[in-house]
């Protein structure tokens, strides 16, 4: 039975944070086709329900969507306290950004120190230095991309 929410209403889906498989909101088992999805009239009610659900089911993540459902990105993701540090996208974006900055700093030190010493160091500069540069740029780009996408 398909129930559509009207504009101004919100869905709350529970999912496994590792696999994104939908879970039944009452039992925590894998959701079936007939599993009901809670619909709320206000965003605050949906957040309150999501917080209570993740307290009750410690291995679940709650995703809050607007009336369009899972057609777009979730408005908010609520994690249990034990999983918040591991799966929080804002925290991961910060961590990747700073890891990228550190790798780019190591690349700069490596380039200044070893690039102009002798011809023998060119191979090591290329092998290690280019890996530091590429990984650093990837991490910085992913971190900055997250922040720009969620402004």
Image (cartoon, grey):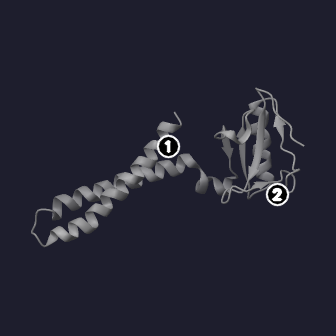
Dot 1 lies on which element?
helix
- The residues bearing labels 1 and 2 have C-alpha atoms spaced at a distance of 30 Å
Circle 1 packing at 10 Å, graded few (<14), some (14-19), many (20+), is some
**In percent of the image, x 29 and y 54: which residue is there?**
105
Residue 103 placed where, x, y %? 34, 57
Left or right: 65 in relation to 123: right
- Closest to the observer: 109 or 126? 126
Left or right: 8 in relation to 81: right
Find disc 2 in the rendering and name its residue: 28
**In percent of the image, x 77 and y 51: which residue is there?**
55
- Closest to the observer: 129 or 35? 35
Disc 1 to disc 2: CB gap under 8 Å: no
Compared with 14, 109 (above or below) is: below
Residue 151 placed where, x, y %? 51, 33
Circle 2 packing at 10 Å, graded few (<14), some (14-19), many (20+), is some
Check residue 105 in the rendering and tell me which mark sits there, or answer none: none
- Closest to the observer: 96 or 19? 19
Dot 2 lies on which element?
loop
Compared with 128, 46 (above or below) is: above
- For residue 121, which quarter of the picture? bottom left
Compared with 11, 57 (above or below) is: below
Residue 113 placed where, x, y %? 17, 62
> How many numbered discs sit on the rendered protein?
2
Q: Earlier in the sequence, mark 1 or mark 2?
A: 2
**In percent of the image, x 87 and y 46: which residue is there?**
36
Image quarter (top left, top right, bottom left or bottom right) of the N terminus: top right
Left or right: 39 in relation to 17: right
Left or right: 13 in relation to 105: right
Residue 72 placed where, x, y %? 65, 39
- For residue 31, which quarter of the picture? bottom right
Find disc 1 in the rendering and name its residue: 146
């Amino acid at each position: 039975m398909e129930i559509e929410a009207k504009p101004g209403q919100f869905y709350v889906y529970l999912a496994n944070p590792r696999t994104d498989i939908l879970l039944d909101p009452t039992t925590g088992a894998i959701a079936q086709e007939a599993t009901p999805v809670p619909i709320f009239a206000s965003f605050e009610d949906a957040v309150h329900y999501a917080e209570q659900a993740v307290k009750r089911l410690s291995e679940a993540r709650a995703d809050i969507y607007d009336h369009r459902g899972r057609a777009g990105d979730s408005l908010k993701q609520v994690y249990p306290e034990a999983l918040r540090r591991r799966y929080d996208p804002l925290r991961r974006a910060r961590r990747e950004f700073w890891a990228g900055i550190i790798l780019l700093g190591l690349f700069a030190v490596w380039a200044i120190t070893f690039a102009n010493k002798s011809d023998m160091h060119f191979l090591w500069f290329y092998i290690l230095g280019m890996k530091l540069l590429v990984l650093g740029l990837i991490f910085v780009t992913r971190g900055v991309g997250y922040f720009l996408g969620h402004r």
